[in-house]
Amino acid sequence: MCPIIDSIAILEKGNTIMRIEKITIQGMNSTVQRDFTLHGDSYTYITGPNGAGKSTIMQAIQFALLGYVPDTGKTKEAVFSHCNGRVSDTEGHPAMSVTLDFDIGAQITRRMWKVGAKYESSLSTIPANLDVDGLIGKTGLPIFNFSEFIGLSANKSKDFFISIFPPTLGTDGISIASEFHKAISGMVMTDNVSKWMLANLPDVCYPVTVESVRGLCTRYKEDVSATKADIDRLTSTIRSLVYYDDCDPDESADAISQQIIEYQQEVSKLRSIINAIQNNDSIMADVQRFYDDLLSDEEREKIESRIEYLKGALNLQKELMQEKSDGLREKNFRMSEIKKIIRGGGRCPYTSTCCATITEKISEMTNEMSEIESEIRKLDQEITDLNNNIAELGKEYTDLTYKLARECEAHNQISIRERGLIKIDPKFDCANISEIESRIDFIDGAIQEMTEHKAHILANQRYENLLDDLTREKAESEQKLDILKAWVKVTDTNGLQTRLADAPFKALGNLMNKTLSAIYGSDTYSVFNTSEGANKFNFGMVKNGGSYVRYSSLSSGEKCVFTLALLIALTEYNDSDFKIILIDDFFDHLDDQAVERCFKTLSEITDIQILVAGVKQSQLAADHTIFIGAES
């Protein structure tokens, strides 16, 4: 049963492996919209001129399965660099998508689009619970560039191979406990270390597999790091235990502590006095600015008397102003009446008829009007003078009342600030801050000297109490470290892992030899040298019964064939029901005969879906070939 699909309907076909039947690519690289149907029985050979889109098919499958294209990078910007901008989503944003249709009815569609400067992506599957990560399986190179993989150190490359081998049982007769005892034979250890060693030994029934040994190695390496850190801590602690010869053994640290406390209390009191002095000085400096607004009793009496006089004078002036204003209104009213009669030419203002009596008085009224005008001018001048007098008296009144108010406010502000004065011990009334600070400096120096002397006394006590215990504890930790290092050496890549991996390496070689012998003949086979020495691991092949040649010394064509055999063998270790190998530009390094043998070998592999891309044509691969021309 496929572990990543729960739908019974999809599994009714009963396939042993899943295969991609169809690829749909939109907006990727140079492709706008293309569908490709793959051959379902074994391999598919994708051929066509350079630039036709062969590599695009390979990259599209990687994008759909992984969410990125390994050769380009994993960043969203790097992935979206494959979008050609010629396809848009429903909202007009540049987009690319790849859909993989599988022979069992499953489907994977991965999309990516750009909104402004932001990249968005989605993954949809049929069925909805299809686990794409589980589909790929756990087997894969630690880095996707095979030339970089080949460049790994011997230990790292061997460690990679061991990590992918199935957890099969190792060599019969190997006992972890026995190997561990043998590794530490002859080591001297205390009773405590001996008990610790027995407690950390694996059980006699512990499974002897590559996977279990790797687990032990990881655990003991972590223990080595922790023990080293513990030794460093103990060493640092021991170094900190210094014995001071200048200390009297009879001196008491408690007595010194009491003296320090008394000094600290005195310093605290002196600092509070300095703060009080500075506070009072600040307040008095602030109060000083209000003294200019204070008045003497004589000045205040004069101002108050003057204010009373001004009140009376202002009232008299205002009464006279009222009297003059009333007279002015009467004169203006009389002037208005006379003007009406004169302008009416003798008509009665009430009957609107000419009245001889009024006509006779026009001349008299004209003279009266002249006298009234003169009186009005005089009243206007008198009112102006009164206004000026009232303004001058009012300004003086305002200034004097404001002066009294300022004095009152000054008294209030002085009172408020004086409440913030701090009472100081009388003996410090005349004290100088610099003198107090000198005393504080002296006490601080004495406290520092006493503190150091107290530390020396305590250090001597600690030295005597802890030195023996710490030295013994460090020695036991060093014994544990030696044991752990021995156990790491037993379980690391060049120890038991190599011994236990002999059979899996042979199995890997046998899988590879099927491919190598099919292409080069039965006398060609792979070789993995799994020496237990550090960085001694290497691999290559023997061709046609000749000498062993390391991979790095093989020809480019031989490297390609060896890599193909290795990839097919590694894929056999994949625990997924979906196994696929993508090979691009593989046959460019092979002669025609080797190409034909490769195609014949690939046609016999039915449990792995293999996609090969290349420019060369092959008659043998005609039934498996998809020719790609330029997109119409």
Image: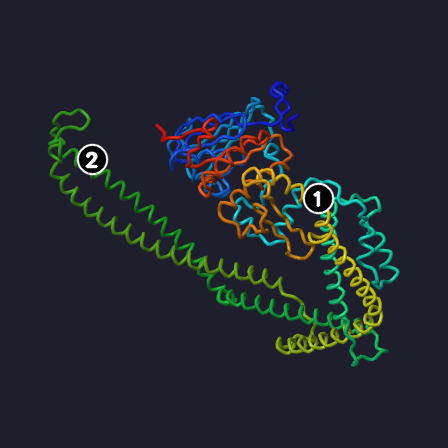
Left or right: 340 in relation to 385: left
Left or right: 464 in relation to 586: right
Q: Residue at x 64, y 68 (%)?
A: 276
Left or right: 448 in relation to 333: right
Residue position for label 2: 337
Viewer-side residue, 209 vs 381: 209
- Counting from the top left corner in percent of width and height, residue 55 is at 44, 37
Specify few, some or many for label 2: CA neighbours under 10 Å numbering under 14, 14-19, or 20 or more. Answer: few
Amino acid type at mark 1:
Ala
Q: Nearer the viewer, mark 2 or mark 1?
A: 1
Q: Secondary structure at mark 2?
A: helix
Mark 2 or 1, nearer chain start: 2
- Counting from the top left corner in percent of width and height, residue 148 is at 53, 49
Viewer-side residue, 191 vs 20: 20
Viewer-side residue, 610 vs 95: 610
- Counting from the top left corner in percent of width and height, residue 453 is at 76, 76
Quarter of the image that includes the N terminus: top right
Q: Residue at x 69, y 52 (%)?
A: 493
Quarter where residue 139 is shown: top right
User: Taking 387 as reference, is 361 above or below it?
Assistant: above
**Mark on residue 503?**
1
Q: Secondary structure at mark 1?
A: helix
Quarter of the image that includes the C terminus: top left
Q: Residue furthest right?
A: 191
